[in-house]
Amino acid sequence: MDGDGKAEVYCKAGVGDPRDEKGLVQSGPEYLVKLDGQTGKVVAKTAWLSRDGFSDYNRYCRNFLTVAYLDGRTPSLIMQRGTYNLIKIQALDKDFNQIWYWEAPQEKKKYRGQSSHGLITADVDGDGKDELVIGAAVVDDNGKGLWTLEMGHPDVCYVADIDPGNPGLEVFYGFETRQKTDGICVVDAKTGRKLWAHKK
């Protein structure tokens, strides 16, 4: 991340053992921590995305961390909290300075609940910069929503060059959210346009 030729380790952390009697972490501070890759020593930390705005544990316990090349050259850290309703995403540089912050509140209702069980980085529009495939929606490299299917939560989400006849990448979905049709589908990764769908 910092170009010194040695790998760093980034992870979500708390203080001591913050688990309650059920083994859940529902209180206490949470951090994004940078560890020295050789010693495991804490080098730096910053606050993790807050639990504020989430209705229950199953909503705020969904946390993801990945690396994206938002400018096409420099690695950036991406934190996400939330899957089934509210979604918060923050992009940071190697020193934990914020690049941008995005969330799907009520005014961006069409993006709410669109996340999957992972956070995928891929250059879906061919501009040389990574976008974030959060599930049934994509956030652009600049922290703006690029497109959303408005189909809810997919359990399965894969990005690849699936269709040789379609330029660029595609996304394959299998939705948990009940659909009348198209619950399994393949879409164009740049636009979200459906290329194929199972009609039952």
Image (cartoon, grey):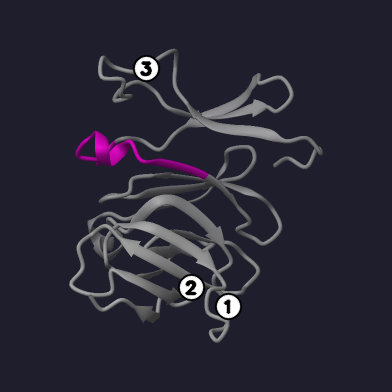
Q: Quadrant of residue 94?
A: top right
- Near mark 2 (Cα within 10 A), the count class, few <14, some 14-19 or many ≥20, is many
Name which residue type carries label 2.
Ala
Q: Amino acid at mark 3?
A: Pro
Mark 1 neighbour density, 10 Å: few (under 14) some (14–19) many (20 or more): some
Helix, strand or loop at disc 1?
loop
**Is 98 located above or below residue 147 in the figure?**
above
| Residue at figure coordinates x 27%, y 41% from the top left | 59
Q: Quadrant of the N terminus?
A: top right
- Out of 3 and 167, give the one closest to the viewer: 167
Q: Quadrant of residue 141?
A: bottom right
Is 55 magenta? The answer is: yes
Kind of residue at disc 1:
Gly
Q: Position of residue 191 (x, y in %)?
A: 44, 77
Give the Cα separation between the discs numbered 1 and 3.
44 Å
Instruction: Tell me the element at label 3.
Output: loop
Mark 1 or mark 3: which is in front? 1
Position of residue 54 measured from the top left corner of the image (x, y, whole percent): 24, 40
Which label belongs to residue 189? 2
Residue 188 x, y percent position in the rendering: 46, 77
Left-right relation of 121 to 144: right
> Which circle marks residue 168 in the picture?
1
Q: Are marks 1 and 3 in contact (CB under 8 Å)?
A: no
- Pointer 3: what residue? 18
The span from disc 1 to disc 2 (Cα, nearest Å) is 8 Å
Check the image and report above or below for 76 versus 31: below
Residue at 60% x, 58% y is 70
Q: Is residue 62 magenta?
A: yes
Residue 162 placement, left or right of 107: right
Vertical relation: 178 (above or below) 30:
below
Q: CA distance from mark 3 to mark 2?
A: 39 Å
User: Helix or strand or loop: what does disc 2 sit on?
Assistant: loop
